Amino acid sequence: MGVLVSQISIALSGLVAGMLLWSAIGGVPWMRRLPAGEYVRLHQYWSPRFDPLGPIMVVGVLACDVYLLLVAPTKGAQYLLGTLIAALVAVIVISATRNAVLKKRVMRLDPDDLPADWQERDPRPAFGKWNMVRTVITVLVFLGNVEAMAVYTL
């Protein structure tokens, strides 16, 4: 059972890391270059498509890694999986307290009638920063899950 759960964890964490990596190296830089109204329009288009998928996959990885921690055969595996779980919780906290807050603000805007203080409130720099933090963490979690798989196959 450990091998199967580890494979699921690798698949899900790879998808999350890939989705966020695409966002960090493609989506966010592209959105930063757009005029404000077009950015809001694009964000309003993309967000409903990514939002349900990303959190579901992160929670799936977390559930798999908790299971693997509970059945881990060595202290080294327990330490690795505990670290991965802590990293996933960090991703969830950053997503909920940073990125989701910024997304909700953008989702409420009218792209054709932006607030007069848009230049001061433009969420793109903050969103990009926190998105990069999540991206780095999820790539490391993916690599950690690949390493954890060795415990269940050797």
Image: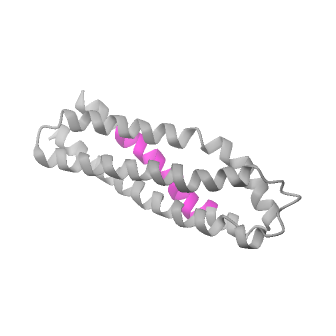
The residue at the point 21 percent across, 34 percent down is: 70
Can see residue 17? no
Does 128 lie within the magenta span?
no
Does 11 lie within the magenta span?
yes
Q: Position of residue 43 (x, y in %)?
A: 71, 53
Q: Quadrant of the C terminus?
A: top left
Residue 85 versus residue 70 in the image, above or below: below
Residue 125 versus residue 76 in the image, above or below: below
Q: Residue furthest bottom?
A: 119
Colour scheme of the rendered structure: one colour
Can see residue 18? yes
Q: Which residues are magenta?
A: 9-27
Q: For this view, does 31 lie left or right of residue 81?
A: right
Q: Quick one: 153 or 36, which is closer to the camera? A: 36
Q: Residue furthest right?
A: 112
Q: Position of residue 93 (x, y in %)?
A: 45, 50
Residue 57 versus residue 27 in the image, above or below: above
